[in-house]
Image: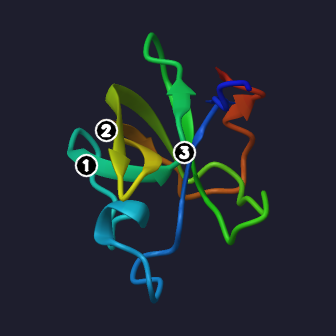
Amino acid sequence: MGIKVEFNPDLALRAFGTPGRLEEECLPKEFEENKIYSFLKEGQRNYWLEGETPLLETKGNQNLSRPLASINILEATHFLREGKPYTKGKYLIREVFTDNKTHFESYKKI
């Protein structure tokens, strides 16, 4: 038996107000630089904490948007809810992207 852990190079959340999702599972309605937000993801996930990482929108099944913002993940905690592992945490928005330029090469901010 193994331990299922996912390593994520980004934070991918659902669109704001996605039916059936909690607020922390979704992107904020408005993105504000230098503001801290909470997130919640199903599964035991590991995130990079030592630099900026992209914030994406997911539609599920690894269908991801281009980076919407650059963030720092400030904390990530694993816990069980009804016997299933989850990861919750906080992130700080550093920069909101409003153009179609490339802002990241893989996990590295340009």
Which label lies toward us, 2 or 1? 2
Q: Which residue is mark 3?
A: 43
Who comes first in sequence, dot 2 or dot 1?
1
Residue 23 is labelled as none
Q: Tell me the residue at 54%/33% (across/down).
A: 45
Q: Residue furthest front?
A: 1
Who comes first in sequence, dot 1 or dot 3?
1
Who comes first in sequence, dot 2 or dot 3?
3
Looking at the image, is 15 positioned above or below residue 73? below
Q: Give x and y (percent) for residue 61.
A: 78, 64
Amino acid type of the residue tagged 1 in the rendering: Tyr
Q: Nearer the viewer, residue 34 or 13?
A: 13
Q: Which residue is mark 1?
A: 37
Residue 25 in sight here: yes
Residue 8 in sight here: no
Q: Nearer the viewer, residue 83 or 5?
A: 83
Quadrant position of residue 110: top right
Quadrant position of residue 31: bottom left
> Marks 2 and 1: CB-CB under 8 Å?
no
User: In what element is the residue under mark 3?
Assistant: loop
Q: Give x and y (percent) for residue 18.
A: 47, 83
Q: Quadrant of the N terminus?
A: top right
Q: Tell me the residue at 74%/40% (across/down).
A: 102
User: In what element is the residue under mark 1?
Assistant: strand
Q: Give x and y (percent) for residue 87.
A: 41, 41
Q: Residue furthest bottom?
A: 19
Which label lies toward us, 1 or 3? 3
Q: Which residue is mark 2?
A: 89
Disc 1 to disc 3, C-alpha distance: 19 Å
